Image (cartoon, rainbow, N blue to C red):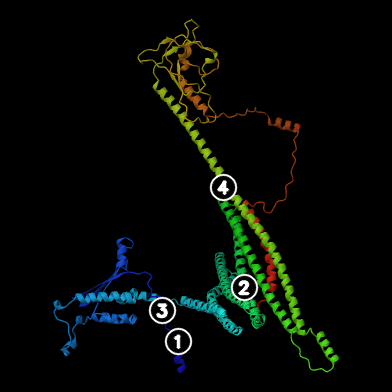
Amino acid sequence: MDSVELDRLDSLEGWVAIKSDIFEEEETFKLGFIVQWNVIESKFAVTCHNRTLQRQKRKAEVSVGDPQMSWAGLFSVSDLKHIHQQFTCVADVLGGCFPDISGFEESNIWDLLFLNRRSCPEDDSERDFDAPCRKLEKYFSTAIDLCGRKIVLETLFTQDERDVEEYFENLQEFKKTTMQEEMSRAKSHLRQLLQSHRSADRMVALLRIYETEDEAYRDLVAVATSFFQYLLQPFRDMRELACLYKIEILKSLEFEDLGPKRIAALEKEAEEWRMKAEDAAASIQDITVTYFAQTSKALAGMLKQMEEDKRRFGPAAWASAAPRLEKLRFLFAKETLQHMRATEMCLSRKKDTIKERLENLLRRDQNQRADSRSAFGDGRQQDTVDQLELQFYETQLELYDAKFEILKNEEQLLVAQIETLRRQVKELKEEVVYYDVCEDQEELQSMIHTDLQQADSPIISQLRRRLQSLESKRGSICSRRAYLRNKKDQCIEAHEQKQLAGKQSSMLLSQHHQVHLKREKRKEEEQKRKQWVDQEREKTLSRLRSFRERRQGPYILKTPQSRKCPSEVSCVSQPMSIISLSPSTSPEEPPSIRPAPRRNKTPKKQQPKDIPVQIYSAPPPPSVPPPPPPPPPAMPPPSPPVRASPSSEDAPKPLCEKEEPPFPAKNMLKQNIGTMDEILASLQRGQIKLRKVSAVKSAEDPRSNLMSAIRQGVTLKKVVPAQEEVPSRGDNELERSIKAAMMRMKKVAADSDEEDRGDDDSHSTDWDS
């Protein structure tokens, strides 16, 4: 019964873990106290202001409603004395700093019983309020410096109950932190022992250090094992739970009669549990890698220090420590081998993830092949395929490095065992044999001869057989290393080719982009030129329309008499920039016919009368752009306005060099009426391209055509035999690139993976013991 009570007393049930750094201050603040006596409440009013935050508030660095800005409270004399006792528990120095405020205590029944007891004056005007208040302010400021800001504020101004939880540690985090600290202490202890090797100048002292060091390493392994087992436990539980749920779902899908919606929901749930189980297994692998990295690092330090110790001692003295060195090499190779095997598992998982992503991309592309997709989306998926292939090559190279490390450590294990066996064989051979005293020399020779014949004892024969098997295993490891080296070279070559192809594609893409930009720029310039030409034509048409609207009055017919060359006949169909008819000087005057001045004084045959035409051409643009299709005919040079002068230069110039027969002057007015419509039509015709019109075939009897075709015969064409359909005939470019990448990846890694898996299965049990 007493033991049960003792167990209950020692039990931690009901205890809570308190944070060790709960009162540490991350920031320093300057606090100011204001203390005044409240006559109505008969208590001290204590106000605390955060001067640092107030200063930042003035600079608009902190929000106005910050709760840490100030605190206030009313305290009686007894409350202040109780607070002083709490402060003295933290800092004993505050015991003599508390001011005397007994004069502010309220009168009670003891004052009536003991008349000589000191009591406060009845008149408030006789009291000194200022001095005790200033002393209390100084006391609180000293308490802040000695006890800390957080303790003083929490004691004076009690917060809500919810803030109490902030003091407690999270049990899971607390346990994890405790185990990490314990493992850190074990590491530091082992490090100190390794550093103490230099102080040992004798082999006996060094052997004692070796024993202590082995014990420290065992403690480190125990602590690390418990810590990493604690980390692994949640993932193990999750993996087990996910597997159980997945099995139950598969059973219900197999044996129960369910609807399609329920089946789809259960399949989705099973897939989710499968993903959770895989994630848990991946986390377990990562934690395992971390554990073996810690243990192998500790063994590496111990082995390095022991090899340094070997240089300080001779062979005879070091013979007593040689078995430990061999054992340490064996343990180091074994832990490193486990570490690299765990790393290989992680890299294989990463490689399988890349393959799965490629397969999902291929499956998604096959499902979306019927849908319309943009070229930009295909290009982006192609970039994703290239990135995944590069990641696969990089992961495969890391995997090859891990395999080389595994082979190296396997060889180290074999070498350690081989050296041990050779040492044992050497010790057996060098064992001293003591013979009995023999008087006959022939008998002694026969005994020596018999011993030489029986030198190969069964123990030595067994050791030699083991030595031979280990040598054969070492030879197989060398052959596997050579094979993996060749596969690694192939992977490196494929990786470099892929990188080179990526660089070339990026260069081609940049060049294509530049060419595309130049083409777009050229198109914009052509569009601007075309718009400019269209604007000029529109301006010309608008001027012609405005001229026609303004010149609806009577016309003055002029008959210029000048020598008319055959090439000076105007062409009506020629479009012109501005064509104006000379109106009469005043609208009131009737139309009249004036004789045009002669070119020469010699009389010549009078030419037919014509309406004088003034031609205005637009000023040439600063840069002559190429005319739009179809190009209009060449414009005549600009001429000054036609004036009535006797000089030959004032005569109107012809519009075309085409020679036409002269026409009588009486028809000039009728022919010139409606000239503007013809000019507008000709300008509009200048903007329209002519199309070639096929000749209309005459209607013929189809029977006659058929009969003629039969008589002429039909020319036979050579038929090319259709090739066999390839299974990937409907594959698009993205699908072909994905399949090609998967084939390259398989060529680089598949053979080595299959062979190495077989080798691992055969050699996995060799180093477990």
Tag 2: amino acid: Thr
Tag 3: amino acid: Ile
- Residue 493, position as x, y percentages in the image: 66, 57
- Asked whether 661 or 518 is in front, the reply is 518
Q: Quadrant of residue 427?
A: bottom right
Q: Which residue is mark 1?
A: 11
Label 3 vs 4, first from the N-terminus: 3
- Residue 306, position as x, y percentages in the image: 61, 77
Q: Quadrant of residue 157?
A: bottom left
Q: Residues within 10 Å of mark 3 (few under 14, many from 20)?
A: some
Secondary structure at badge 2 equals helix
Vertical arrangement, residue 355 with respect to residue 688, above or below: below
Q: Is residue 556 visible?
A: yes
Find residue 383 and name its label.
Answer: none
Find residue 18 and name its label.
Answer: 3
The residue lying at 62 percent from left, 28 percent from top is: 696
Vertical arrangement, residue 712 with respect to residue 518, above or below: above
Tag 4: amino acid: Ser
- Residue 363, position as x, y percentages in the image: 61, 58
Task: Give the distance between the C-alpha atoms of the residues marked 3 and 2, in whole angstroms.
Answer: 40 Å
Q: Which residue is mark 2?
A: 336
- Residue 181, position as x, y percentages in the image: 49, 77
Label 3 vs 2, first from the N-terminus: 3
Q: Which residue is mark 4?
A: 510
The residue lying at 35 percent from left, 69 percent from top is: 28
Q: Is residue 746 visible?
A: no
Label 2 vs 4, first from the N-terminus: 2
The reply to whether callout 4 and callout 1 are in contact (CB within 8 Å) is: no
Tag 1: amino acid: Ser
Task: Give the distance between the C-alpha atoms of the residues marked 1 and 2, in whole angstroms.
Answer: 42 Å
